Image: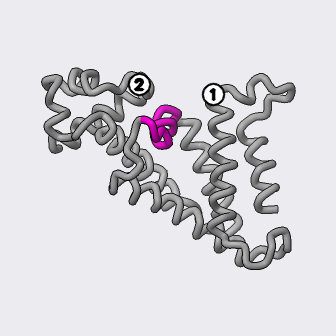
Amino acid sequence: MSARQRLIRTAADLLVGSGVEAVTLRGIAKAAGVSHGAPLRHFSGRAELLSAVATLGFTQLLQRGAQLPDGTPRERVTAACHAYVDFAVTNPAMFELMFRRDLIDPEEPGLVSASSAVFDTFAELVRLDRAEADDDRLRPGTDPRLVAASLWGALHGLAQLWLWGGLAGASFAPSPESALAVTLDAYLG
């Protein structure tokens, strides 16, 4: 494993163990057993290193999409939605980092490529589902990518609310699964 890859892996491990705020260049160097200046020989700064870690997160999420079970388009898009929320709930620090534009470089080419691949895969699942849908809930000609973006936003919001306790104080405090079921019913019918 190259020194660059070791630093990315160490940062990812530190992220999982201690959270986003604990992932500093000095902390990564210490955990990797290298000098405190070593990360700057491989990355221009913290944002570039964290972008590489976030890219790893998007790659992991994309791999989940590649492992969806066979089935109808509806079954596959539903499984993808469950996989997204499950990824967020089981990887809260990585999930947070992946969308923290204040910590990562959102224009870093590897990150753009990985995040775009996740969205494009999801959008294609939604397109296939909408093409087979037997309802008229959407205006004719509605771009399935807009439906995918809206659904992704709903899933992301649901995951964030659950992770950071936004629904815990609700009078009914839904489980992620029950809230996800209602979201899917609203979008997919």
Q: Is residue 69 above or below residue 40?
A: below
Q: Residue 38 vs residue 92: left or right?
A: left
Question: In what quadrant of the picture does the C terminus appear?
Answer: bottom right
* Amino acid type, label 2: Gly
Q: Is residue 120 above or below residue 10?
A: below
Q: Which residue is mark 2?
A: 17
Quadrant for residue 75, please give it. Answer: bottom right
In space, the residues marked 2 and 1 are separated at their CA atoms by: 17 Å
Q: Is residue 92 magenta?
A: yes
Segment tinted magenta in the rendering: 91-102
Find out whether residue 38 is within the magenta segment. no
Q: From what the image shows, is residue 132 above or below residue 177?
A: below
Residue 36's spot in the image, x, y percent? 17, 23
Q: Is residue 170 visible?
A: yes
Q: Characterize the local packing of mark 2: few (<14), some (14-19) or many (20 or more) Cα atoms within 10 angstroms.
A: few
Residue at image x 14%, y 31%?
38
Q: Badges 2 and 1: C-beta atoms under 8 Å apart?
A: no
As drawn, the label of residue 58 is none
Q: Secondary structure at mark 2?
A: helix
Residue 117 coordinates in the image, percent (x, y) = 46, 62
Q: Which residue: 48% across, 38% down? A: 100
Task: Mark 2 or mark 1: name the one nearer the start of the chain.
Answer: 2
| Discs 2/1, front | 1
Horizontal relation, residue 69 to residue 7: left or right: right
Q: Residue at x 49, y 61 (%)?
A: 66
Residue labelled with disc 1: 164
| Along the line of sight, the residue nearer the viewer: 182 or 64 | 182
Q: Residue type at mark 1: give it.
A: Trp
Q: Is residue 113 above or below residue 130?
A: above
Question: Is 55 placed left or right of 143 in the picture?
Answer: left
